[in-house]
Amino acid sequence: MVNNLSEYNSIFSEWVREIRDVDIQQDRMRFRRNMERIGEIAAYEISKHLPYSVVTIQTPMGESICHILEKQPVLGTILRAGIPLHQGLLNYFDKADNAFIAGYRKHHRDGTFEIEQQYITCPDINGRPLIIADPMLATGSSLVLAIESLLDTGKPSQIHIVCAIACTEGIELLKRKIPEAYIWAGAIDEELTARGYIVPGLGDAGDLSFGIKKQS
């Protein structure tokens, strides 16, 4: 299931505009905070799809029946670009365990690239919702590799993917490779360049959050 969070007008659209705007992008702190906000909204929407249990609690004036999550989710992110988006999810799912994957595109002189994955750390995901943060869903290759690596460690009850900007090509790959996944996108673009960058997109989310890297 694909969910476009910009489908209906809301303040959310302001944050998507700001992360795209080349002038506002110069303010790294604002860029990171807007990514965090997008993660927070996504967390709230995802929470509506998770299972809950009924509990009775004691208040100063009596008893109250409340609903709590049956199981805390596992929040995963692809370093380094996904950190602000991941933080937004963690702000809401503040009791969640966390997984981290280090992967990058290794570009070749002919313009092609391959995905290099160098690091993964993950708690037990069996029977728990798995929520993956990756700000830019372009070709989808790195995200599929990351999720498949996590699935090698266990079987989650649900899979949710959160992206600030997604491309239709990456969405289609995910639908083929991981059809059970829910996709939550801040916005969806149609075009992808030959080098695998989303157009209009927003540029390099990692560089905009943390500075330009030396590696190409």
Image (cartoon, rainbow, N blue to C red):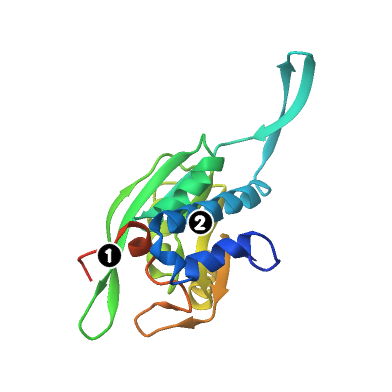
**Residue 169 position in % (x across, y down):** 49, 78
Element assignment for label 2: helix
Q: What residue appears at the point 36 percent right and 48 percent down from the top-left corner?
A: 100
Amino acid type of the residue that numbered disc 2 sits on in the rendered structure: Asn
Amino acid type of the residue that numbered disc 1 sits on in the rendered structure: Ile
In the picture, the disc for residue 165 is none
> Image height check: is 198 above or below 71?
below
> Considering depth in this image, is 187 or 121 the residue closer to the camera?
187
Left or right, residue 60 beside residue 136: right
**What is the tally of numbered marks visible in this picture?**
2
> Image height check: is 3 above or below 61?
below
Asked if the residue at tag 1 contacts the one at tag 2, i.e. Cβ–Cβ closer than 8 Å, the answer is: no
> Image height check: is 113 above or below 215?
below
Element assignment for label 1: loop
Left or right, residue 116 beside residue 2: left
> Image height check: is 34 above or below 136?
above
Q: What residue appears at the point 44 percent right and 46 percent down from the top-left corner?
A: 154
Mark 2 closeness class: few <14, some 14–19, many ≥20 residues within 10 Å: many
Mark 1 closeness class: few <14, some 14–19, many ≥20 residues within 10 Å: few
Q: Residue 135 is drawn in which quadrant?
A: bottom left
**Residue 188 position in % (x across, y down):** 56, 73
Q: Earlier in the sequence, mark 2 or mark 1?
A: 2
**Residue 19 position in % (x across, y down):** 48, 65
> Considering depth in this image, is 132 or 189 the residue closer to the camera?
189
Q: What residue appears at the point 39 percent right and 70 percent down from the top-left corner?
A: 141
Q: Mark 2 highlights which residue?
A: 34
Q: Mark 1 highlights which residue?
A: 212
Q: CA distance from mark 2 to mark 1?
A: 19 Å
Q: What residue appears at the point 68 percent right and 37 percent down from the top-left corner?
A: 52
